[in-house]
Image: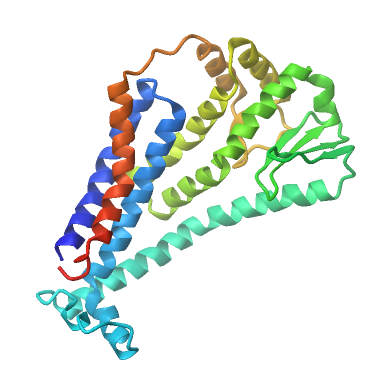
Amino acid sequence: MMHGFVLALFAAAILATAPFVLDRAEAAGFSPQLVQQGWRAAAGGALASLALAVPVFTTDLWAAPARSLGLTTDIAPEIGLGDVPLPAQVLVAVLVLVGLVAGWRRGGPVVRDYRRALRVQLDRLERTSPVLDEKERGHPRLVIVEDTQPRLVLLPSRPPRVEVTTRALDLLKPEELNAVLTHMTGHLRRRDALWMTVSETMAEAFPRIPFFARWADHSAALAEKGADDDVHGPIARSNLRRALAKLSGPGQANGPFCPCFAWPLQRQEELTVRTAPKPGRTPVAVAALRTLTAAALIVPTLVAASPHFLYI
């Protein structure tokens, strides 16, 4: 029982304090990738802790069926929370199941919308006759199609694709095209589309937990800043800014794949501001944030790995 309380309290501590710590880190100029990792680790640590706490508080419900199937050892009868009534354990299990079902009913449409949007883009691409379909190991598949719209679409499929129209090639200079492709490759490498969908799904599924709403609010902006950092140097960033300005318009496909073109004025302003040298973070501060990020995942792992995890 003690381990269950430890895990539950640890999850509550993460959900309560992580948004404050990560907001401060982002405002202080920490690396967007590091802050992204912090949000993801905090969410994973909190969910893992809660998931591990449930079997500790409901051992009578799963130990008895396990014994009947011969899946437990001689020590199995001692497992459980002897001072917790069975109705209380049933109540915990019911509340968890109801919460999961309700969460999926609210958050499931986000996943379905993401998959539907990707399928629509892939179907549209398959119906076209590409001018060039280039495959290169270690890089996203580049597909050039003939179209009067200046469109450059990131598709996190398998394999990942980047669709470029002939009109976009006419508008962009080679260095501008290279800058925006580098930006999009960064999105693909970090699976930003997937993580943005996960954060939005959790925010919709559990609207009463502020942590997930805060995570969803920051996810897209951090993904954009992280991809911007992949474009090195003031000249390359100026090329990216010009490319985004040329490609922003009604013909673009925004949404969960790459929000690069969703707010062109704000993006251009951010790229202009971020060309200035960033203040360096002290090694102690960076190490502290990395330690907190690692602790979010290590603590529940250590608790679960304890030889007495389910016996106390």
Residue beneath the point at 24% across and 57% down: 303
Whether residue 246 appears in this view of the structure is no
Query: Residue at the spot x=87%, y=45% of the render?
Result: 128
- In the picture, measured across the screen, residue 102 lies left or right of residue 165, that is left
The reply to whether residue 113 is in sight is: yes
Q: Is residue 6 above or below residue 284?
A: below
Name which residue lies at 59% across and 42% down. 256
In which quadrant will I find the C terminus? bottom left
Where 303 sits versus 95, above or below?
A: above
Left or right: 166 in relation to 93: right
- Snapshot quadrant of residue 101: bottom left
| Residue 301 left/right relative to 226 | left
Quarter of the picture holding the N terminus: bottom left
Residue 178's place in the image compared with 69, above or below, is above
Query: Which is nearer the eye, 51 or 108?
Result: 51
**Which quarter of the picture shows residue 19?**
top left
Pick whichever, 255 or 301, lies toward us.
Answer: 301
Q: Position of residue 138 (x, y in %)?
A: 68, 39
